[in-house]
Image: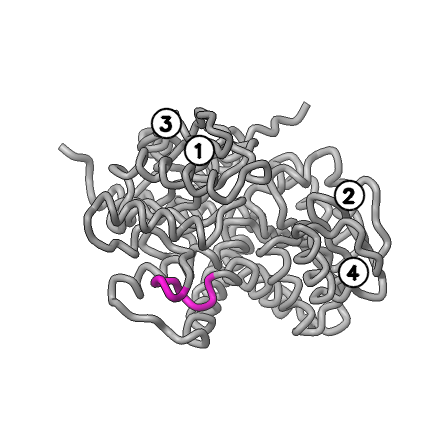
Amino acid sequence: MENLNPYQIAQVQFDRAADKLDLEPWMRDLLKTPDRCVTVNFPVKMDDGSVKVFTGYRVQHNDSRGPYKGGIRFSPEVSLDEVKALASWMTWKTALVDVPFGGAKGGVVCDPSKMSRAEIERLTRRFTYEISDIIGPDIDIPAPDVNTNAQIMSWIVDTYSMIQKRNVFGVVTGKPTFLGGSHGRSEATGRGVATVALELLKDEGLEPKGLTAVVQGFGNVGYHAARIFVEKGVKVIGISDISTAMYNPDGIDVEDARKYAEKNDFLLEGYDKAEHLSPKESILEVETDILIPAAVENQITMKNAGNIKAKYVVEGANGPTTPGADKILYEKGIIVVPDLLANAGGVIVSYFEWVQNIQKEQWPYEMVVRKLEEKLISAYKNTRNLAEEERVDMRTAAYMIAIDRVAKAIRTRGIYP
């Protein structure tokens, strides 16, 4: 049976690239091991007067190229292995797109859908307090992730600032623009997915107009990717979320579907302008030009990879394709643009936000979009070129570039003492 443990998958992906690089054994051991794994257990007062103990994690993988950087997620599925995998992917992602950060990730085991706003605020503030000695603008900079948003980042800013007895807006990214956030941040990951996909089409000699796309996951990433596809002439024929999957060969009105979801607890269930598919995972097997898995990990596995009919897979989510599935897709001639590259738009604009906070500036939206696209297209070209030179898939090429950059930083800095 295929191994679906995200941390072990991350190790397999790392090893494939490390073998190609002929990485020294000590360097391999160092880069596969997180610098620090922090587990905290803390009480939170609930609305009914009871007290519940929650478990949270912050994993700091590597900071050789700059401060640790990575999101915080609130989910009942959070585990230490998941957070370790996500932290390592952030190290490689920041190195690949050449921003001066390392990799980290955090999470709290909870179900925010069953908690009030006040309970989520108290949980956020207490978790911030628990990890306050290991985060900061020059140490480790959290950001939004699954089930967290600009409001939660604002509570982190406020709590951390109270501890420091001064305003520290740069402690997180993904803040509202009126609290030091960057224009273009909320759409950045989805815009990045679309930007990389469109660059791939250009490389393949294809015009976007008339092509089709399926987007699995209709949250922030999936929606913005779908929206930009439609703007460029791509017909979005399938979308899905946690509640359902929908297909319409004539195209789905992305804006209309979004408005429906916003009025329906952000769920697509019950939307009547497309055919609903069962099981919803079958959305991945719809015949299309471009498939965007933008939901969660382990969606394309050895079990269903043989049924994928897309020509191109552009990963909006972290870790949606398993190593076994990668091999099957590669042998089928399907080009996979890996998560390290495809969904790096978020961390690039997070870097821009951090720079703006340091400089006490706020850049115009158009400037953010231009600089984002420049960085992503440069990283895409480097990855595609290396993949062709080394005759490897783009994921291995992306890892090779990223690992080489981090290893070079470590060798140059040396080992203390």
Seen at 35% across and 57% down, the residue is 99
Nearest-to-viewer mark from 3 and 2: 3
Q: State the mark number for residue 412.
A: none
Q: State the mark number for residue 40.
A: 3
Disc 1 target residue: 84
What whole-number distance in Å separates the C-alpha atoms at marks 3 and 2?
A: 36 Å
SS at mark 3 in the image: strand
SS at mark 2 in the image: helix
Q: Which residues are drawn in magenta?
A: 177-185
Horizontal and vertical percent position of residue 183? 43, 68
Quadrant for residue 215, please give it: bottom right
Residue type at tag 2: Lys
SS at mark 4 in the image: strand
Horizontal and vertical percent position of residue 12? 52, 32
Disc 4 target residue: 237
Question: In this rendering, would 140 be left or right of 118?
Answer: left
User: How many neighbours does mark 4 have within 10 angstroms: few (below 14), some (14-19), or many (20 or more)?
Assistant: many
Disc 2 target residue: 280
Quadrant for residue 232, please give it: bottom right
What whole-number distance in Å separates the C-alpha atoms at marks 2 and 1?
A: 29 Å
Counting residues from the start of the chain, the first of labels 2 and 4 encountered is 4
Q: Is residue 288 above or below residue 321?
A: below
What whole-number distance in Å separates the C-alpha atoms at marks 4 and 3?
A: 44 Å
> Badges 2 and 1: C-beta atoms under 8 Å apart?
no
Question: In this rendering, would 169 be left or right of 379?
Answer: left
Residue type at tag 4: Ile
Counting residues from the start of the chain, the first of labels 4 and 1 encountered is 1
Residue 408 in sight: no
Residue type at tag 1: Lys
